[in-house]
Image (tube, grey):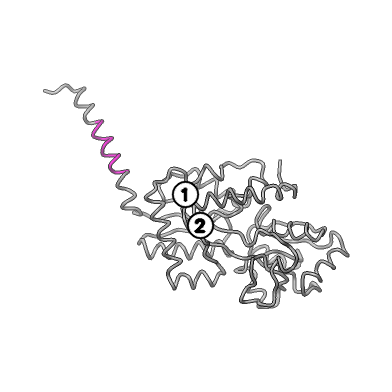
Amino acid sequence: MKNPADLLKRLTVLSFACLAASAQAQPASYPTKPIRLVVSLPPGGGADGLARIWGEYVTKTLGTAVVVENRAGVNGSMAASYVATQAPDGYTILLGTQSNLALNRFSYAKLSYDPEQSFTGIGMLATTPQILVVNSEVPANNVADFVKLAKAAPGKYSFSSAGKGNSTHLNMEIFAKHFQLDMLSVPYKGSAAAALATIAGETQVMSGVPSSAMPFIKEHKLKPLMVFFDKRLPEMPGVPTAAESGIAKTLGGGWYALTAPKGTPDAIIQKLNAVTVKMWADKEARQKLNSVFMIQPPDLTPGHVAAASRRDSEQWGPLVKSFGLMDQ
């Protein structure tokens, strides 16, 4: 009879070998169950629409369901914190934003995740413009009109945003600083809520993503004055860009990226990146993306997520700090 200790040792080694083989095989068979895509903003806005288009395409292409889970709060930090603690197996991923992956560190003193160390980039997903809009009752039809009104009544005008430190907030701070305007910032949970506040007259002006603002522009409930982007929008050829209005640099419309918890196998990262690239090449999917005013980034690779985060931190961090938004 064999020594029981030797038998136990061999069984232990065999067990570990099976586990290792299973772990190596998992990426090849991935996905075998639903994928959760955690979105850091509420339903109804541009990020949510983008997430659902991506999820629909992945479901069709990879044959597994994608469940969109909205976890709004602290300008996307709640969603990022949650995903950072999940298993690195490709079944819980984050729709990251310029805010929670690059700029929140300059608005919030304590983040329970590290924007650069907690995640592995899957790929850039989309960019979108923003539009400076005012309530339809505001007697301004262009930027010069609004600046004149705001200068004549310091403190009278307030602007809404999708959250403190969000790109919709920071673009308005840049706008106010450039024209030396005294305006109150009123943050809301998401771009849809911010747009409704401006329509209702709770605030008078905002920088909104087109998917939230455009329907109300068409209904003449909001008036567009300027576009935070490098070119005019085809839907509004008469509305000038920020540069044409005298502001040399703005955040533009911000960007969205897919990230996974640090340690996610590279095979899974590459598989999700490949399906994202295919989505942008798919005619039907691109039409849906165009309908929510999403634009294909010039670089869809996984490495560009970290590069964009570092670039924006370095470029915009000092300016965001100068706004004095940091909580204690």
Q: Is residue 71 left or right of residue 268?
A: right
* Main SS category, magenta section: helix
Does the stretch in magenta take in 104? no
Gap in angstroms between the C-alphas marked 2 and 1:
12 Å
Magenta stretch?
12-23
- Which amino acid lies under the numbered mark 1 shown in the image of this protein? Ala
The quadrant in which the C terminus is found is: top right
Given the current orientation, which residue lies at the most extreme left position? 1
Identity, as a three-letter code, of the amino acid under mark 2 = Met
Q: According to the image, label 2 marks what residue?
A: 124
Q: Quadrant of the N terminus?
A: top left
Residue drawn at x 83%, y 64% as measured from the top left = 150
Q: Secondary structure at mark 1?
A: strand
Q: Secondary structure at mark 2?
A: strand
Of 47 and 276, nearer the camera is 276
Report crowding for label 2: few under 14, some 14 to 19, many 20 or more residues within 10 A (C-alpha): many
**Of marks 2 and 1, which one's residue comes earlier in the chain?**
2
Magenta segment includes 22: yes
Nearest the viewer among 328 and 240 is: 240
Q: Is residue 52 left or right of residue 234?
A: left
Query: Which dot, 2 or 1, sits closer to the camera?
Result: 2
Q: Which residue is at the front of the view, 120 or 94?
A: 120
* Picture coordinates of residue 90, whole percent (x, y): 41, 50
Q: Residue at x 61, y 53 (%)?
A: 99
**Residue 260 image label:** 1
**Dot 2 and dot 1 residues touching (CB under 8 Å):** no
Most foreground residue, 201 or 117: 117
